[in-house]
Structures are given as structure tokens and as C-alpha cells.
Amino acid sequence: MAAALVGGSILSAFLQVLFDRMASREVLDFFKERKLNERLLKKLKIMMISVNGVLDDAEEKQVTKPAVKEWLDELKDAVYEADDLLDEIAYEALRLEVEAGSQITANQARSTLSSSKREKEEMEEKLVEILDRLEYLVQQRDALGLREGVGEKPSLQKIPTTSLVDDIDVCGRDHDKEAILKLEDDNSSKISKKARHLSFARIHGDGTMILKGACEAHFLRTLLLFNRSYWQQGRHVGNGAMNNLFLTFRCLRALSLSLDHDVVGLPNSIGNLKHLRYLNLSATSIVRLPDSVSTLYNLQTLILHECKDLIELPTSMMKLINLCHLDITKTKLQAMPSQLSKLTKLLKLTDFFLGKQSGSSINELGKLQHLRGTLRIWNLQNVMDAQNAIKANLKGKQLLKELELTWKDWIGDSSFSNIVSLKLLGCKYCSSLPPLGQVVSLKDLLIKEFGEIMVVGPEFYGSCTSLKKPFGSLEILTFEGMSKWHEWFFYSEDDEGGAFPRLQKLYINCCPHLTKVLPNCQLPCLTTLEIRKCPQLVSLLPRIPSFLIVEVEDDSREVLLEKLSSGQHSLKLDRLKSLDSLLKGCLSTTEKILVRNCDSLESFPLDQCPQLKHVRIHGCPNLQSLSSHEVARGDVTSLYSLDIRDCPHLVSFPEGGLAAPNMTVLRLRNCSKMTSLPEYMDSLLPSLVEISLRRCPELESFPKGGLPCKLESLEVYACKKLINACSEWNLQKLHSLSRLTIGMCKEVESFPKSLRLPPSLCSLKISELQNLKSLDYRELQHLTSLRELMIDGCPKLQSLPEGLPATLTSFKIWALQNLEERIRTNAFSCKEYLDGASAWYVEWNWRLMRQVLFRLIAVLLKSISVREVDAFYACLSYYLDWRKLEIAYVLY
């Protein structure tokens, strides 16, 4: 229903567009100049007004009356045809306007007069046909009971949508989609004659056959053929097929052939697409565009992005007077056509190429006042007269956000004194840098892919004849992709200081032979140093007190040092071969540390780091100790969290425990030899609120004295010995415990069994207890705070408890195969588990889902309120995949 209402509302809006077009100067002038029958135009307007008056009533009645729906469809087709005709008239007016400004021969003039007479007759015939059709529809409205001014347009509700991912993506009307799918199999179906929009991608078949299937849809307005993968090798849309395409689909407004590398050219018949507004040829192998493209006077968008073989544009391209968007990035263009200044509606021009013989064409940019976004101007060395550059009026283009200038002569003298940001890219054969140190206003400098640079020396800084030092304003300096660079000589003068007095950020990336960075020089403002893929660098962390960030990364190591708001540092170490000297130099001021994949780490001096608050040690296979001594002696009072993962040789904590009164989080994962937790946890770790233990199979018990009384969350997963001793956990004494997760143990057959749970528990998650057969509902009933219960991966569970706490709001179940038979035989009553629950879901295998949903919907609709049904449906929509969602929606 919502879709039909949307369609009707679109038709109402479309009629308004037609009214505006009929009253436009182009159409009225064309009727007068060609002496067309103006009464036909007036009659068309009256007919449109007549049908527009009953649209509101028709939109409402089409839902219940198929005849009205058919009437609206016929009306839509007639309106589309009227729009096509009026658009063709507007096109002819544009053509006359363009050709009036160009010189034509006498033969061309006679040809124009002859064709004008023929076109006049054809247009009047088409208009009469449309009027007859509309007149018939107007006569039918009374028989259908349609009245003017009846009904109000309902507010449009958002149509439920879903994102379906399948092997084939097809967009269009349902019957069109089915036809395309059948075309893949047997090439026997055809697209509907009334189809207006067609696109397809990832179709592994013959694209030519699909186009043949759509050949009767003469009124297509959109045709999008993209993603070359859908054409089999040698079965692409060739020139012959494209010629038929352009002759058949003359009403196209949007056409895309993008990503088809087999498209090397376009036939001249593309000029027949008089209505075309959008043409996308990106990533094709096209070399030239035919001159007939210049007759597409309605064209607004032309995308040639990544046409890597394109060498020239049509010489008469200035005729595209409605062009607003021209994307020619990543092409082989070397020059622009003349008189582009006539394209005054251009809003987006990605690139402008200055040829050797057309350097003066830069002045044509002067009349393109509406350019915005990014503009790249290439080959500025071809501008011979500065006056031409001035006429380009780049300063006056207020909407431009980014301007890139490219030329081959070096820069660096005083004539560039106002440059603030500069990027030098891809000079692969350059062996020296220009004197950029003399660009006095420069703040941001990027130098990338200078393949022959081996040494950066005095030439980089320039001659110092003034009191200003080189790079006096520079704040950000980036070197990247300098494959042969191995040495950097810093400029310095002992008496007056060196270069880079304001440098704040220094980035060096992919310089594999560079051996030194930041030699003995003064960089008083440097706060950020980032070095990536420079494996020959020796010194990684220079001692500069102003540092906020130091980052070093390559294939064999990664170091990240960041200054925190507290004034201390965060340190990340990954894949380092030697850690001893680095740790000794940094840990005294480090607040957060991550040590990862460091095979050389055998001992971490946790007790020698008085400022450490957060410690993570991951993937260090040889770690054996967390102290520099067998007995902990140092200060760990600042420690908040400790996270240790994948350290198979770590056996235990230091003798005597960890005196960390502020620690709140302890996580141990995949520590296969860990046998015990820190001693005296109840007294030495009084602030601990979270313990997570995963895959520590040798852990036998919690320490003497039990767990800290403030503990709120406990997870024990794949810790076989510890779970088997759960009767000794004494959780009933933990009055703050609100979350418990237990899982991955084959020995548990009943739960909670001897494990006594505290009434404060809010969330209970049971997973991967492969031999669990039953739940003790009596132990669960006293959990008066329980809101969430999840059971996952317990395939032998035979029954659910007969009653659950009334506080339960979330009940989630996965993979309980033994309950299948009970569901089939109606032995499983849903209602008893749903009382009091407002959000829950069941997710067994797919073959049970339909039965479960039917049963649950039936129960819910009889026993809970409308508001709760809405909550249930919202929950299903969130959790289930698209197939389940589709069923849930039908049932709802």
C-alpha cells in the first residue's frame, strides 16, 4: 500500500513539472517559431489539469480497486510520453540556440529547413495521439467514480526495507527482475514494455542477450550496465550492440557503461539520445569520444574517470551548454578543447590540461565562475604569458576548496612567498630537491616518490642571506616513498640556531635505506614523530621532552609512544627483537603499555613501573615472569587493569601476590600453563570488579580467602579444572556480583548443581556445556534480580525450567537440538517462558525457524499488549537475518 501511495504522489509531483515545462520560454517560443498548433498545447494543459484534480481520490482507491490502479498506470504512461515529447521540443529549441551561434553552410541551412517541416508534422501527430489517450482517460474517470477534491493525501510512512545480499543483484520492478533472472538461464524472457529504469550487476551471463530481452522497452529512461565481471570473456556489449542500444532506447536520461574495459569506442548513434542527462563511461578503454556526443545538448554529467586510454575530447565540446559535471581524472589527456569558456554552467571540473600549443587556453577558466570542490591544473610550464594566467581569475573562484597546480620547473624562490601548503609527488627521476627552505610562508610540505634522491643536504635549505632561517614557518613535514634516500644533513648555525624552528610534526614513511633521523639538532617545537617502513633506522625514541607522539613501524617492528593528557605516556611495542633497553628508558614515565608479539620478552618488570595504570601483554610465547624478582617488591599501587593473552609459558604470579589496591580489571586468556591466580586477592586487590578467565585449563581454584567482595563480573570459560571445582567458589558471598558467564566444559551435566549463586545476579550466560542435560529451576528462582538469561551451545539440554524469575526481560537460546522434537509435537509451551519478558529471541537452525515463529506469534497476539508486540517485532527485526525477517514480517 505504501509503495502505491508513493507512486501516486510521485505522479502528482511529476505533473507539476510538466506544467512548468509547458509554460517555459523554450517550449512557447518553439511553438511560435515553428508555427505549431498552439491550441494543442493548451488542450494538453487542460487535460493534465483534469486528471490532476482526481489524483488524490485515485491514489486512495487504487488499493482496493484494481481498475483504478490500471487507470493510474495508463495515466502514468501517457504522462511519461508527454514529458518525452515536451523534452524533445525543448531539445530542438536548444539545438537552434546552439547552432545559431555557429557558422553553417548553405546546404546545412536547406537541410535544416527540410527537416524542420518534417519534425513539425511528426510532433503534431505525437501530440494528437497523447491528447486522444488522455481524453479517453478523462472520460473513464466518471465511470470509475473518481471525484475532484475528494480525500487528502495520506502522510507517507517509511517503507520497511532490507539489505539483501545474494549471488545476483537486480534492481527494478518485480516482473522485470524475474525476467532478467530467467534471461540468465534460458534467454527466453523479456523485460516489460513499460519498464522505465533498468540496472544490473554481477550477472554472470551474456549481457548482449539481456539487452535483447529488453529491446521492446523502448521508453527506458535509465540503463546502468556496470561491473565488468558480469560479461563473460569475449561476450561484452560491442559496437554493434551499442549502436542498436542507442537506436532503440531513445528516451534514456541516464546511461552507464562503467567498468567495462572492452568498451573502446562509441558509435555516432549516441547522438540520438536527445534526452540524455547523465553519461558514465568511467574505467572503460575508450580512446576518443565521437563528435556526435557534442549534440547531447541536455547532458549535465559526463564521467570519464579512470579512462586510462582517453587521449582527447571532442573539438566541439563547447556545445554542451548544460554540462555541470565533468570528471576526467586519471586519463591521458594532454590538452583541452577550445572555447570551453562557453560551458558557463560547469560546477565541477576535476582537471584542466594545458597543451604545448594551447597554453593560452588557461584564460578560458576565467568565465567558469561557479567551479567548486577540487580543480587540478596540469602543465603550467606551457603558459607563456602571465596575463593569460591572470585572466583565469583563480583568486575569484570563491567556491573552490582545493587547487592543485602542476608544472615541471622547480619552485622555491621568492615568487612563491605566499604558498602555505605544498605537495611534490612522483618525480621518480629527480636527484635533488629545490630550495624549499626559502618559501617563507610554507607550513605544510609533502615530498613523495622522489626515486633518485640519495642525500638531502644544503640545496634543500637554500642560501641564507637574510635573518630568517630555512623553513621558518614550517609546522608539518612529510617524506614518503624515497626508495634510495639514506642520509639527511640538517642545517644548523650554532650562534643563531638551525632550521625548522616551528616544526611540530615529522612523518617519514617507506624510506627503506634511511639510516638516521633527527641527528643532533634543535627542534624545540616537535611533538609528533612517525616513522613507518624504515627498517635501517637505529635510534627509535629520541629524548625530546616536548614529544606527544612517537611512532615507528615496519615489517619487523612497531613502536608507538604517545603523550597523554595526564602528562605521562602510552607505549605500544610490537614485534621487537630486543626490549630491555627500550623498556628501561621509557617505563618510568609510561602510564599505558601494550607489548605484543615480542618473542624475546621473558620477564616483564611490573613491580618496577610506579606510573603504570594499564598493562596489556599479548602473544609473547616466552614470557615466564611478571616481576624482576621471584617475590614482588616494587610499587604497583597505580595499576588499574592487567590483560595477558597468548602467553603459554606464564605459570603464576609473583609470590606474595600483587599489592594493587586500585586494580579493577584482570583478564587472562590462552595461558595454557597458568596454575594459580595472584595470592590474597580478597585483601590485596580490594577494588577488583571484573575477572575474565578464558582457556586457562590448568587453573585449579581461586586463591585462599576467596574473591574480592566488590567483584561485579566473573567469566570462566574453557577452564576445565576450575569449573569442576565450582562448589568451592562461594559466590553467594559476593553481594555485588551482577554478571556471570560460564562455558566450555564437558563434565557439567546439571546447572547450577552445587554452585550457589548470589541473588544480586542480573545476567547469567551459559555456553558450550556440551553435556548439560538439565537446569535446576529451584536454584534459579531465588535470583530475584535476574534480567538476562542466555543459553548457547548446549546440545543435550532436554528441558527448560518450569518457571523463571518474574524480573527476566531477555531470554536468548541457541543450538538446543534436543528441544526440536518437543517443538514439533506441541510439547513445548512458549507462554510459560515468556511471561514478563518484553524482548527475547530464539535462534535454532533454519529448518525450525518457521515453526517457532508461527507458534510464538500465536501466543504473543493472545497474551500480551500491542506495545509488547511492537517490542517483539522490533527485536526480531534487529536480530534475525533477512530470510527470517521476511517471514516475521508476513506473520506480523
Image (cartoon, rainbow, N blue to C red):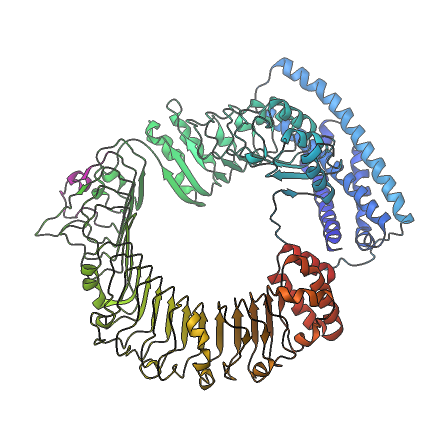
Decide which of 401, 38 is in the foreground and name it: 401
Decide which of 611, 275 is in the foreground and name it: 611
Quarter of image, res 249 = top right
User: Looking at the image, can residue 29 be seen?
Assistant: no
Residue 225 at what x, y percent from top left?
60, 35
Is 635 displayed left or right of 675 in the figure?
Answer: left
Q: Quadrant of the N terminus?
A: bottom right
Vertical order, 782 against 883 (above or below):
below
Q: Does the magenta stretch include residue 459?
A: yes
Is 418 displayed left or right of 293 in the figure?
Answer: left
Name the residue at the right extreme. 143
Decide which of 407, 21 is in the foreground and name it: 407
Residue 135 at what x, y percent from top left?
86, 40
User: Looking at the image, can residue 773 be seen?
Assistant: yes
Quarter of image, res 733 = bottom left
Residue 324 at what x, y percent from top left?
54, 38
Residue 119 at what x, y percent from top left?
74, 24
Vertical order, 766 against 729 (above or below):
above
**Image point (78%, 59%), residue name:** 152
Quarter of image, res 185 = top right
Q: In which quarter of the image is the C terminus?
A: bottom right
Decide which of 664, 743 is in the foreground and name it: 743
Is 763 displayed left or right of 626 in the figure?
Answer: right
Vertical order, 277 against 291 (above or below):
below
Q: How many marks?
A: 0
**Secondary structure mainly formed by the magenta segment:** loop
Bounds of the magenta segment:
452-472
Q: Does the magenta stretch include residue 461?
A: yes
Vertical order, 812 against 418 (above or below):
below
Name the residue at the top extreme. 107
**Image point (40%, 39%), residue name:** 394
